[in-house]
Image (spheres, rainbow, N blue to C red):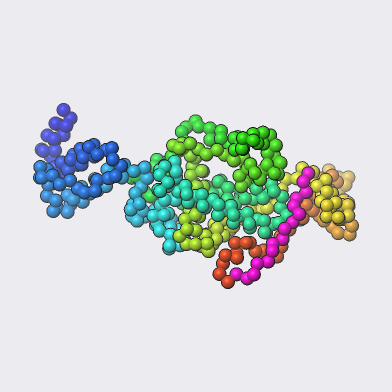
Amino acid sequence: MKRLQLQRWSSTVLSPRARTVNRLHQHLYSASLRHQSTAAPLQSEPQDASIGTNFEDPEVMRQVRSAHKRKSQLQYPSPPVEAATNSAKLAALHARLYLPSRLPVQTLARTLVDASADPNADFNNESLATLGHDLLTYYTSEYLLCKYPRLPLTVIFAAMYAYVGPKTLAAMAKEWGVDLAAAPGGEVDPGYLQFRRVDPGTDVNAATDDVKTPRPYANAAKWRKTVTSKIFYDDEFGDPIKGASAPGEGVTAEQASATFVRALMGSVYLHAGRPAAKRFFEQHILSRSLNISDLFNFSQPARDLARLCARENFEKPVAKITSETGRLSRHPVFVVGIFSGQDQLGEGAGASLLEARERAALSALKGWYLYSPLNVRVPSSMEEDGASPWEPAHVDLGEVIT
């Protein structure tokens, strides 16, 4: 009944050209129903003489092609490759990040498609993210190990997480102006980050308690807090290795944003080479300010300092008061220095002698572990053209195991 009413209304109200376009849309709709089992879009416009359409009319053909294109895009889980050249958001992102000209916008559009949105490995960013993840962790770890060779392992993990952790990468994507798509689809602008969101009420931290360990070492989770277990059974940030999400499951916005930044790093490396990737890393990762001294957390600094001095064959550390004020007042201040023979290792101030001594020992430990050699070079610098001969980097004995 509704179809008869629509035909009657179109025959009485619409113009001849509008009636022709309406009949074309009906024909395309019926054709899409006949071919809905196929994934490929229609390759040519329908040529049916019974429609009575004037194909020489450019306005009619423009409307037919636009309708055909919209119906074809709905068949894809992500935007088609040719849509990247017409996206203003994609071109703006390419120019905003000052990406190399050799990086095409089609690849940039692929970095914005998460594997949860499009499971096809030829169109999502999973492979690019794997390469970018390895490059980011490699460049970050070599920088930290060469610049601060005495850092404890836990501090290295914390520093790497601060530089290339998922929260940092998600914040970078937000600072770059990357918008999130409400839902993935072929009709979405390629400039949006597309991913399938997790269902409401899902516990996203449920998988973080599982530790991937080989079957002969099933009890490794009980002793994974040791340094050796951290190296073999943890990820690059010192956390337990998370299990891979099942196909078709959604991801959080933080995970999708971090994957996009890793995929962008991998795409820069593939299209522009190592120098461009290293420059991209320095401009967007190492340029962020990080105070390494705030990452230390010693429970007993005085004991750790005594063990360090014993290992390095230094004289036993002795705490001495260098100055004080207001001892008998309500707010006294004591300044204590830690000395090893005639050398002062650290100094600290506090409201009590015990507090000042702990702060002085903490200052001495930070002064030791934050040592940085002059003219720091990383191994990846040898890949540059005209690099000077390599000089071995300083390798320390390691932290004091307590």
Q: Nearer the viewer, residue 386 or 151?
A: 386
Q: Residue at x 71, y 52 (%)?
A: 151
Q: Is residue 283 visible?
A: no
The residue positioned 66% from the left and 53% from the top of the image is 291
Compared across the picture, whether 300 is left or right of 229 comes to right
Q: Residue at x 51, y 47 (%)?
A: 258
Q: Is residue 390 magenta?
A: yes
Q: Is residue 369 left or right of residue 135?
A: right
> What is the quadrant of residue 224 in the picture?
top right
Is residue 314 toward the left or the right of residue 98 in the image? Answer: right
Instruction: Give the main secondary structure of the magenta stretch.
Output: loop
Q: Nearer the viewer, residue 326 or 323?
A: 323
In the rendered image, residue 154, in percent from the top left (x then y), is placed at 69, 46
111 or 334: nearer the viewer = 111
Magenta part of the protein: which range? Answer: 387-402
Q: Quadrant of residue 88?
A: bottom left
Residue 149 vertical position relative to residue 326 in the rendered view, above or below? below
In the image, what residue occupies the spot 51% across and 43% down?
A: 255
* Residue 89 percent location from the top left of the image: 39, 53
Residue 314: x percent and y percent? Answer: 86, 55
Q: Nearer the viewer, residue 277 or 292?
A: 277
Q: Is residue 306 visible?
A: yes
Tell me: residue 374, above or below residue 228: below
Image quadrant occupied by the C terminus:
top right
Identify the image quadrant of the N terminus: top left
